Amino acid sequence: MRTIALLLACSLAAFAEEENLIKNASFEEPAVQARTVERDGGNPARVADGATSWTQFQSFVRPQDKPGGELVVGMTNQFARTGKQSIFVDFQNLGAQRRSFLITDLLPVKAGHRYFIALWGRTDSKRPLTLDQRRPLLKIDVEYFMSDPEEQCEQTDHRNERIPGSLDRLLFVSTKWTEYFTSVRPPQDAAFMKVTFRWETDREAGTTDGAIYFDDASITAVPGGGSLAPLDPVPANPPAPGEAAPPKENR
């Protein structure tokens, strides 16, 4: 038992030391003095170049969307898991279909290596999102790009999670912060990935009313999560004289 506990502790320590690929992951910039919607400055993408990995944070209404409530996003200093700030997603008596998103920049990754994507959340105690109303969705979209960022890989990963959870498993509550996490493995032609967090309501009948806060986003390499298959297979025969040698495998 002692050996197992020691191995587990070492594994957790290694995971904790992995670098978070996201800058401004705790939404500390820009500093806000109150609950501030994104169009008024509560936007983690509106930071000096190099200080944040977020490129867009907003909600939007398409011309074809029917009227019926609002979906508002922004930043607040009222709640935080770490630091002083978090972001919020506020569904205001929403009976129609609405969408919002938070998008990262292109982040460098190792092809074939597994990565954890995580985000901590908690619902508002005064206006919680509950199971007895139309439940919104948290969606994670992961796009991969080659060494030339203009070239996108064919593989795209998608994850869906109902808020505050499923009927038999409540994930997000108002009494504590809970971590949502998933893992992905970039394809062998990937050099970068872009992650989009989406919050939206679908076409189900009903009304969604309540707010949820998110903090401490992270994208980290899984220790020992490298692909077992070589990225560049070694040719069976050496190149003939005058031919270019095969590229070396990146380590």
Image: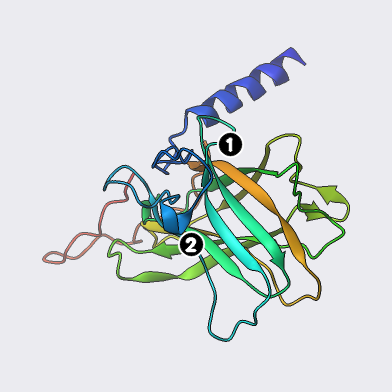
Instruction: Say which amino acid is labelled 1.
Output: Gln
Query: For this rendering, which residue is in front, 18 or 104?
Result: 104
Q: Is residue 133 above or below residue 248?
A: below
CA gap between label 2 and label 1 equals 20 Å
Which residue is at a point 44% across and 40% down the rendered structure image? Answer: 32
Q: Position of residue 4 (x, y in %)?
A: 71, 21
Which residue is at a point 15% across and 66% down the rendered structure image? Answer: 243
- Relative to residue 175, is residue 146 drawn left or right? left
Query: For this rendering, which residue is in front, 102 or 160?
Result: 102
Q: Position of residue 14 (x, y in %)?
A: 52, 27
Farthest residue to the left: give it. Answer: 242
Q: Earlier in the sequence, mark 2 or mark 1?
A: 2
Instruction: Say which amino acid is labelled 2.
Output: Gln
Picture disc at residue 78:
1
Number of numbered markers = 2
Quarter the N terminus occupies: top right
Quarter the C terminus occupies: top left
Which residue is at a point 30% across and 70% down the rendered structure image? Answer: 150
Say which residue label 2 marks: 58
- Relative to residue 79, is residue 136 drawn left or right? right
